[in-house]
Amino acid sequence: MNPETMLQVHDVELCVQTAGNPADPAILLIHGAATSMIWWEDELCERLGAAGRFVIRYDQRDTGRSTNDPAGHPAYDMADLAQDAIGILDALRIDQAHVVGRSMSGGTALILAVDHPERVETVTFMATSPGDPGLPPPTPELMKAFEHDAPDPADHTAWVDHMVRVIRAFWGGSPFFDEGRVRALAELDASRTRDLRSTDNHFAIETPGPVGGGLGDVSMPALVVHGDLDPVFPLAHAFALRDALPAAELVVLEQTGHELPAERWGEFVDALVSHTDRKPA
């Protein structure tokens, strides 16, 4: 991984990190709600870089080292998050990127694909949903993990313990859950985040859709990647999302929940590299 860089994008400061050769096709990785870029793990990014891709990951607002708003008072919405992504591409002098939106950030990826198609070569929706009524809700086991409020971040140990418990629930019973690995990432996240209380701002923001249409208006090649054990968006969400897109491929990761285990990195990298080699019809 290259060193982290702080970029001034519009009126916010965003922490960005890259891997690979800048001359290679760019992949912009956008993580989900309340989660910093480190959950796109280093080795995963390096594997994509070794496969001939220039990988960009970044802390969205209110995560990691990027600008944070006061807890409970986010002064932005999902359209602003999409503009942040464009600002990063501008700062790195990248005309087009392969955009990957994970979980909540599937909405950001959709805004980019529909409203800014000139900047998006392909789009990937990972562990996300079209949001259609009637799709299965999160599992009871996942909801149980949120029955108790998070502890005061000043109690570092209690905060990390809480995060590990919550993230375990997001794995949806996957046999690949590695508590030591998750705890190390939670420790790192806690140590590098400006204000842990502000990470929950992502759950309070407005999530407007694209101005120029919806899923049916995505004009570039699309990929849907989903775990078969996802407790947040059960697998029916992935099929509905694929069917709502004009021409999308679906990759289902077996024994995988909402998170991406190391045991599935090879399959994910292969799928993403193949997808980003596709040309528009």
Image: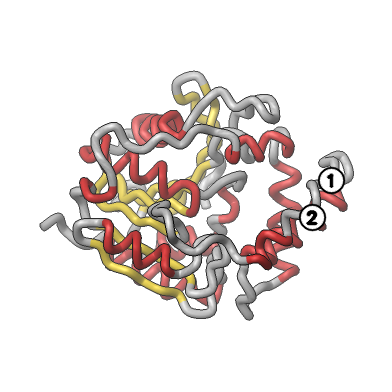
Q: Is residue 21 visible?
A: no
Circle 2 Cα neighbour tier, 10 Å, few/some/many (<14 / 14–19 / ≥20) = some
In percent of width and height, residue 58 lies at 51, 42
Identity of the residue drawn at 89% across and 44% down: 155
The quarter holding residue 239 reads bottom left
Kindly identify the amino acid type of the residue bearing the numbered disc 2: His
Residue at the disc numbered 2: 162
Q: Secondary structure at mark 1?
A: loop
In percent of width and height, residue 171 lies at 62, 68
Of the pair 139 and 111, the residue shown nearer to us: 139
From the viewer's perspective, tell me whether residue 74 is left or right of residue 9: right
Residue at the disc numbered 1: 151
Kindly identify the amino acid type of the residue bearing the numbered disc 1: Pro
Which mark, residue 135? none
Q: Secondary structure at mark 2?
A: helix
Dot placed on the residue nearer the N-terminal end, 1 or 2: 1
In percent of width and height, residue 185 lies at 69, 57
Of the pair 203 and 268, the residue shown nearer to us: 203
In percent of width and height, residue 272 lies at 35, 64
The quarter holding residue 201 reads top right
Q: How is the image coloured?
A: secondary structure
- Whether pointer 1 and pointer 2 mark residues with C-beta atoms closer than 8 Å, the reply is yes
In space, the residues marked 1 and 2 are separated at their CA atoms by 7 Å
Identity of the residue drawn at 86% across and 39% down: 154
